[in-house]
Image (tube, rainbow, N blue to C red):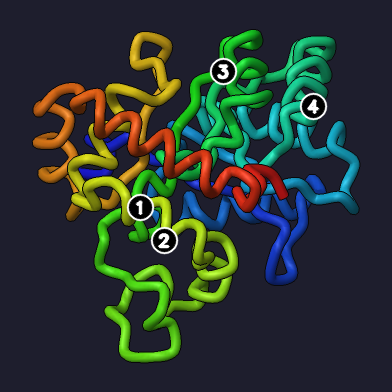
Amino acid sequence: NINKFRIATKANPWEGKTLKPESVRNQLETYLKRLRTQCVELFYLHAPDRQSPIQDTLQACNQLHKEGKFKQLGLSNYASWEVAEIYCICKHNNWVLPTVYQGIYNATTRQVETELLPCLRYFGIRFYAYNPLAGGLLTGKYHYEDKDGAQPAGRFFGSSWAGTYRDRYWKESHFQGIDEKPTLTSAAIRWMYHHSHLRGDLGDGVIIRMEQLHENLTAAAEGPLKQEVVDAFKHAWDLVAHECPNYFR
């Protein structure tokens, strides 16, 4: 029964789509039809569309919200100043406010800590972190020098997004950073839950695949890391900060 789940979906400006009102409506209604439901919990604007006026997009979202087609508005891949602009436009017009931001965040990708998270805190917007394992880099199963050789299938190889993930993380400094700390998945997840800037009491969360659920629950239950491991993660971040991918597009 689909009603037992809280479903999120997105509108994006790629592959012939835009964030113009008619495209936003078409995307959401198409997803609702495919999901065989009349309403989703969360509807994201997946990334900025520089060719579509944001006020028109937000007005269209508000109309869809009034029609009962989604409950919460989310943002993803917007810069902090754009989040502030969007919130103020919605507030001024009494439109549905954004309440969730989905962004890239992990132990070696921490750009959101400087401006975005303070912005979200100010406006009361929850943060859902994706890529908590840096696309798999923090599992320790990849080796920088083997880039052109046989590699396990995953985010970096064998998928349509592989090139994007290699551009984002496949840098020698990233591999140097994780060589000096435990590369177990549980260590990276425990860092997310116990040592990052996420705030569970404010509704923040970590986005994972279903098959990772048990591993994540186990890691979270193991509690905080030893200080030397936290320090190693900090050193890893210091090594890669200059090459950190932008959280916005």
Say which element carries label 4. helix
Q: Earlier in the sequence, mark 1 or mark 3?
A: 3
Quadrant the N terminus occupies = top left
Residue 195 at what x, y percent from top left? 34, 23
Residue 84 at what x, y percent from top left? 76, 20
Residue denoted by label 3: 125
- Residue type of the residue flagged with mark 2: Phe
Cα–Cα gap, marks 2 and 4: 32 Å
The extreme bottom residue here reads 149
Residue denoted by label 2: 175
- Residue 153 visible in the displayed image: yes
**Residue plotted at (76% across, 36% down):** 60
Q: Earlier in the sequence, mark 3 or mark 4?
A: 4
Q: Are there few (<14), some (14-19), or many (20+) residues within 10 Å of tag 3?
A: many
Left or right? Give the position of 51 relative to 36: right
Cα–Cα gap, marks 4 and 1: 32 Å
**Which is in the foreground here, disc 1 or disc 3?**
1
Q: Are there few (<14), some (14-19), or many (20+) residues within 10 Å of tag 2?
A: many
**Which is in the foreground here, disc 3 or disc 4?**
4
- Residue type of the residue flagged with mark 4: Trp
**Pointer 2 and pointer 3: residues touching (CB < 8 Å)?**
no
- Residue type of the residue flagged with mark 3: Ile
Residue denoted by label 1: 178
**Residue plotted at (51% across, 58% down):** 173
Left or right? Give the position of 219 relative to 110: left
Residue 111 at what x, y percent from top left? 60, 36
**Which is in the foreground here, disc 2 or disc 3?**
2
**Residue plotted at (63% across, 23% down):** 98
Cα–Cα gap, marks 1 and 3: 31 Å
**Residue plotted at (35% across, 35% down):** 206
